[in-house]
Image: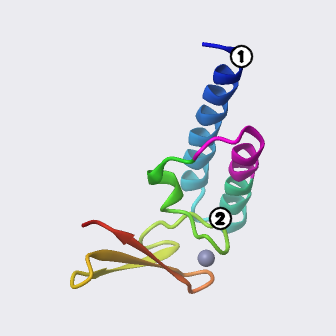
Amino acid sequence: MNAKDRRKAIAERRIRELYRLALMHIHDKELSRYYISLMLGIRNHYKVKLSKEIKSYICKYCKLPLYPGVTASVRLVSSHGYLAYRCLSCNRERHIFYK
Ligand SMILES: [Zn+2]
C-alpha cells in the first residue's frame, strides 16, 4: 500500500466515524449537521467516494442525515419501485430505488 492509498484508507475510516457520530447525535440537528459538514470536507480534500449507504441517506440540500422517524418520513412508492425519503427539515424529497 502506497502513501496515497494509506491516506485514503484513513480518510474513509474518519468518514465512517463521523457518520456514526452524526447518527448518534441525530436529535441535535445542528451537531449532526456539523459532523456531516466535517465528513464532506474530508471527502472533498482526499477525493474519496462516499459509500452508497452513506451518500443515499444524507439530505442533498441541508446536509442532515435522513433518519426515519426523526429527520425523515419514509413512504413506499411501489408502483415506481422506490422509497421516498422526505427531509423534515427542508421538506425536500429523495428517491431511493430498490428495484
Ligand atoms: Zn433537507
Dot label at residue 54: none
Task: Looking at the picture, tell me which residue is in the foreground, 77 or 80.
Answer: 80
Q: Residues within 10 Å of mark 1 (few under 14, many from 20)?
A: few
**Three-letter code for the amino acid on which mark 1 is drawn:** Ala
Residue 8 placed where, x, y %?
65, 30
Q: Ligand 1, what quadrant?
A: bottom right
Residue 43 placed where, x, y %?
69, 45
Q: Is mark 1 within 8 Å of ligand 1?
A: no
Which residue is denoted by mark 1 in the rendering?
3
Residue 16 placed where, x, y %?
56, 41
Residue 93, magenta (yes or no): no
Which residue is denoted by mark 2 in the rendering?
28
Answer left or right for 71 relative to 41: left
In this picture, which residue range is highlighted in magenta?
38-49
Q: State the predominant SS element of the stretch in magenta.
A: helix
Spatial CA span between label 1 and label 2: 37 Å
Asked if residue 60 is positioned above or below residue 55 in the image, the reply reads below
